[in-house]
Amino acid sequence: MNARRVVADFGVFSRGYIRSRIGAFFALVFPVILILIFGAIFSGGSSGPVSAYVQNQDGSQVSNSFVSALNSTNTIRLHAVDTSQNFTSYLLSHSASDGIVIPSGFSSAFVSGKPVNVTVYGNPASTTSAIVSGITRGVVNQFNLKRAGGSQVIGVEPQNVKSQSLKYIDFLVPGLVGFSVLTSPMFALVNISSQYKRDKIFKQLSLTPLTKSEWLVSKIFFYIVLTIISFFLMTLVGVFAFGAHISLTPWIIPFLVVGPLLFVSLGMLVGTGSKSVESSAVVGNLVTFPMMFLSGTFFPVSTMPAYLQSFAHVLPLFYVIDGLNNVMTYGNYGAALIDLGVLLVLSAIIFGLAVRFFKWRED
Amino acid sequence: MQAVDGISFAVREGEVFSLLGPNGAGKTTTIEILEGLRKQDDGTVRVLGTDPWTDGYALHKKIGVIPQGFKFFEYPTPREAVKYYAALFGVKADVEGILAKVLLQDSAEVYFTRLSGGQKQKVGLALSLVNDPQLLFLDEPTTGLDPQARRAVWEVIRGLKKEGRTVLLTTHYLEEAEELADRVAIMNKGKIITSGTPAEIITNHSSGERLLVHGSERLAKYLEKSAKLPVEFDGKDLISLSLHRKEDVMAAVAAIQQSGLEWDDLRTKRDSLEDIFVKLVGEPMEELEAKA
């Protein structure tokens, strides 16, 4: 291992990377865009009232006050449907599934005490339907209570377990850091190694004193630097745009070093093992995509079905993201140490295999 | 399938030696074995006194190579590429001198990917010179270049020879071998068919001087009888008489005159390297190129 050659190769590679712009976009701009999008979707406060349609076939003072009681919950927003319309076909023609029908005779039944039903339309699979149905039941109970002349005795007071609760963004930042630890080296190395093989650039390099380990180490250094830069960018956006709570401890560093080491080697292995640039892209995607979605990047692994959770535990990226969550969010360093141990063993194996199977020249 | 089968040749110090042959003749396989990029199944290979496969790492510091269809990283400029190689070899290279030698000063700051085919090839030449090698392997350095770019690369190669460097050049352009090479080995289907200086090859394989005349088959038959010389007729209108002695040409012309038949376009012809090539390889160069 000769430091001068590693440095020279690092210099040429990083300059090329910056000049090509596409690589730099995917490494630096893309993760920030992702964090902005996912942060906005899941952390941007409440999603606003749920829309539902209501047909008031009664049109009395009582039924009108029922509708305004529903509206005043601020959880659903009702759109009135004229009584001349067929309600279900109206819903279908508006691609809506949530609706409430107040039958005629609602007011007289309320006064006389004869049982009457408000009809709630909904889709059992949709969360908005559950909200509409729940809210309607609540208002119905209120009306029943009022008619019986009673008053509310038992109430509910919501309270958080921790004074500062964990938000989705606190989990999203480590997840997306893991995402870029995986994707930038994997996609680049799969592509580079198969392309260099096709264009005989590896052969060309084998005619210089540069060794293949030196070449690989220079790429690993490059992706460590890139990962650290993109880590800081994403953390800044997470903290300042969405108020993420992240503890910046030195414990983060080992994960930002071992992650790129692992995925540069894995990308190299996939790229050199493939016959053509096209087939390497296919194999690369087969390896990358399950990891990208099932390792806890966008949503916690604990929300997945049990069989997918056990599958996640064989994916190397799982240990990067689990480790980052442990150090950045939970401060659970014991668990992080186990993640790091697993990663070190995996990296050693994959780096070894990559050097072993990566060929400079023909046999 | 053997790409190269039982070939033997030696390259002398300071000469330009050309392996000439159609595509698929085994030239690149041969040159890659010499560079230590491939291992031969059998036989002995010595380059600068070493075995290129086992001592490749040491040998590579002493040789310069351009692989066929030279490609490189997209974004270094030629100047940066030369500096990069100098750092890899751990030598203080005369960067500007090398760029000047391969006629690249004007494009020294252009990204590799934006250079023309000929300029890219010159970057390859420049890189092969960084470690100041005495022996250079140039594998089809002008394939795919336009005639002007090809001539510029030739200029560079002539310059290298002038500096006393030894060059092993593969090519499938006859013209290139004739222009540049001191000695040529013609390869086909993995074997060397003949070798020597272009003049030696012509002398050894030439059927001598010939008299060509346009005329009918009747004239061909008449000449065969009366001139007592070997006559070939191409089936259309070209008659070719092989001349063994100087005097044969007189006899042939006299016979043509006596025949009283129509004739036209009388001339004598000596075999060129191309004629020999066609004779030895069996197919004209253009057809081989078209097939490839």
Image: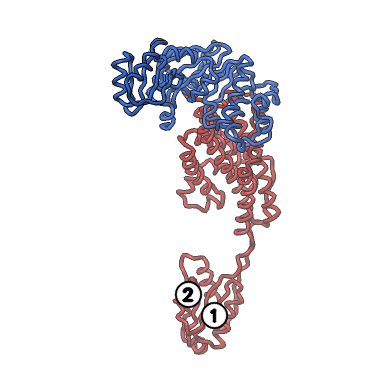
- What is the number of the mark on residue A80? 1
Residue A193, percent from left and from top:
53, 34
In the image, A211: left or right of A88?
right
Residue B254, percent from left and from top:
36, 16
- What colour has chain B? blue
Helix, strand or loop at mark 2: helix
Query: Mark 2: few, some, or many residues within 10 Å (few <14, many ≥20)?
Result: some
- Vertical comparison of B57 with A293: above or below: above
User: What is the letter of the red chain?
Assistant: A
Between B177 and B45, the one lying in front of the other is: B177
**Residue A169, visible in the rendered structure:** yes
Between A215 and A34, the one lying in front of the other is: A215
Between A127 and B280, the one lying in front of the other is: B280
- Vertical comparison of A64 with A290: above or below: below
Task: Give the CA distance from mark 1 to mark 2.
Answer: 12 Å
Letter of the chain that mark 2 sits on in the rendering:
A
Helix, strand or loop at mark 1: strand
Letter of the chain that mark 1 sits on in the rendering:
A
Residue drawn at point x = 62 percent, y = 24 percent: A1
- Vertical comparison of A30 with B105: above or below: below
